[in-house]
């Protein structure tokens, strides 16, 4: 504390303790459809009208809308002493479900999955292992089976994975000049969102997405259209099935899921399939070498503890994983967004 005033009133700590109140307020407004309704109606609505459309209590709705104004997610104006609400530009762009840049599905995943797991963070820290089973009665080894148990669940999860690349995809793809790589595989590429960013950046390039059969089938049905001519698919499990030869392998948010042993196992396999002069591009949320931040990466690392076997890592830790697997000339590019890029060459 730098002054008596700070000691007497610890503003920072008071804000921290209310962090989950802020996020859950936003999640609830998304889940109930507040932003979607206001976008659809194209005019400010009163609390009574919003509650009627959403089938919610008028008192509860009034409090939720007021909090959203405080969070600058909604605007309010008064007509004849009655409050009328409308979306801010931020909410229209990122919280309306139909927006091309919508983060709605990320919000729902955080609310319905991560929020539940984080209730058991103390146990995760004590035990050093995932709490998915405590939260949902499912072993962490069966997470993907649970996520993919129905087509509806798969689509929701894939939208969650897809949407962040609208914000962070281009910076990581443009972090290095990848134009010399002609045969590209996106391992665990899911919906194809990052592959689309790649082919739009490097005209004429084709990217093959390798993922589980159910994921590929859903991606073809919901996410990749006929106009995406430069994206192809290969069904397979990259841990257990052969990985085809290629110039470049992309792994976005893959390595952070696993222990060092499994990471080395996978990277060794990729090295064997990588052509001489080729490379591997890792896309992850990097920690600072001195562990000073970024806060988002530090929180994500806790989330990996709560949900998976893995963790977020520093540039030197990723460099060691790559060099131990045979890759050389490791380059790191911190993009200034959530996700950064690490390139290793064979």
Image (cartoon, rainbow, N blue to C red):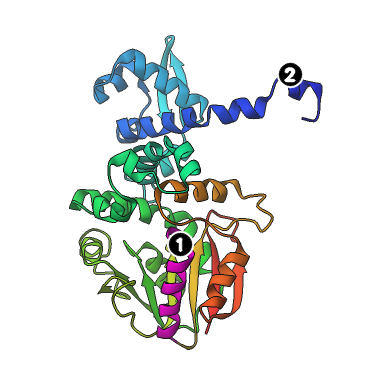
Number of residue marks:
2
What residue span does the magenta drawing correspond to?
255-274
Q: Main secondary structure of the magenta part?
A: helix
Residue 267, image quadrant: bottom left
Please name which of the two marks, 1 or 2, marks the residue nearer to the observer: 1
| Residue that protrudes farthest toward the bottom in the picture | 276
Q: Is residue 96 visible?
A: no
235 left or right of 92 in image: left
275 vs 76: above or below: below
Q: How far across and down, in percent of the image, does residue 189 sit? A: 35, 66
Name the quarter where the N terminus is drawn. Answer: top right
Residue 154 vertical placement versus 224 (above, below): above
Which residue has dot 1 on it? Answer: 259
Residue placed under numbered mark 2 in the picture: 8
Rendered residue at 75%/23% (across/down): 7
- Residue situated in front as seen by the camera: 167 or 6: 6
- Is 222 drawn above or below residue 303 in the view shown? below
Residue at screen point 55% across, 51% down: 297
Q: Is residue 85 magenta?
A: no
- For the residue pair 229 and 211, the one nearer the viewer reads as 211
Residue 22 versus residue 223: which sits nearer the camera?
22
Q: Position of residue 240 (x, y in %)?
A: 30, 73
| Residue 245 place in picture, x, y as percent | 37, 85
Task: Name the residue located 42 percent from the left edge and 16 percent from the top edge.
Answer: 83
Is residue 273 in the magenta section?
yes
């Amino acid at each position: 504390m730098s002054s008596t005033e700070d000691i007497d009133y610890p503003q920072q700590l008071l804000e921290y303790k209310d962090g989950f109140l802020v996020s859950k307020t936003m999640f609830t407004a998304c889940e109930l459809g507040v932003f979607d309704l206001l976008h659809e109606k194209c005019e400010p609505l009163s609390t009574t009208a919003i509650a009627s459309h959403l089938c919610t209590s008028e008192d509860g709705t009034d409090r939720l809308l007021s909090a959203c104004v405080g969070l600058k997610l909604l605007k309010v104006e008064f007509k004849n002493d009655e409050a009328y609400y409308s979306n801010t530009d931020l909410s229209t762009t990122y919280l309306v479900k139909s927006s091309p840049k919508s983060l709605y599905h990320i919000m729902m995943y955080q609310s319905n999955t991560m929020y539940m797991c984080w209730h058991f963070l103390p146990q995760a820290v004590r035990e050093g292992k995932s709490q998915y089973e405590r939260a949902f009665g499912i072993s962490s080894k069966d997470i993907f089976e649970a996520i993919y148990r129905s087509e509806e669940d798969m689509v929701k999860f894939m939208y969650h994975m897809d949407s962040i690349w609208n914000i962070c995809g281009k910076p990581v793809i443009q972090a290095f000049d990848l134009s010399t790589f002609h045969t590209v595989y996106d391992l665990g590429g899911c919906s194809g969102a990052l592959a689309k960013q790649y082919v739009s950046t490097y005209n004429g390039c084709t990217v093959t997405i390798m993922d589980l059969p159910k994921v590929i089938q859903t991606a073809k049905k919901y996410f990749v259209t006929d106009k995406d001519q430069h994206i192809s698919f290969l069904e397979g499990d990259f841990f257990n099935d052969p990985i085809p030869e290629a110039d470049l392998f992309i792994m976005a948010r893959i390595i952070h899921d696993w222990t060092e042993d499994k990471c080395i196992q996978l990277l060794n396999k990729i090295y064997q399939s990588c052509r001489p002069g080729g490379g591997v591009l890792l896309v992850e949320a990097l920690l600072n070498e001195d562990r000073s931040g970024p806060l988002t990466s530090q929180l994500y690392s806790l989330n990996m503890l709560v949900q998976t076997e893995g963790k977020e890592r520093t540039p030197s830790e990723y460099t060691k994983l790559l060099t131990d697997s045979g890759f050389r000339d490791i380059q790191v590019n911190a993009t200034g967004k959530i996700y950064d890029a690490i390139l290793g060459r064979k």
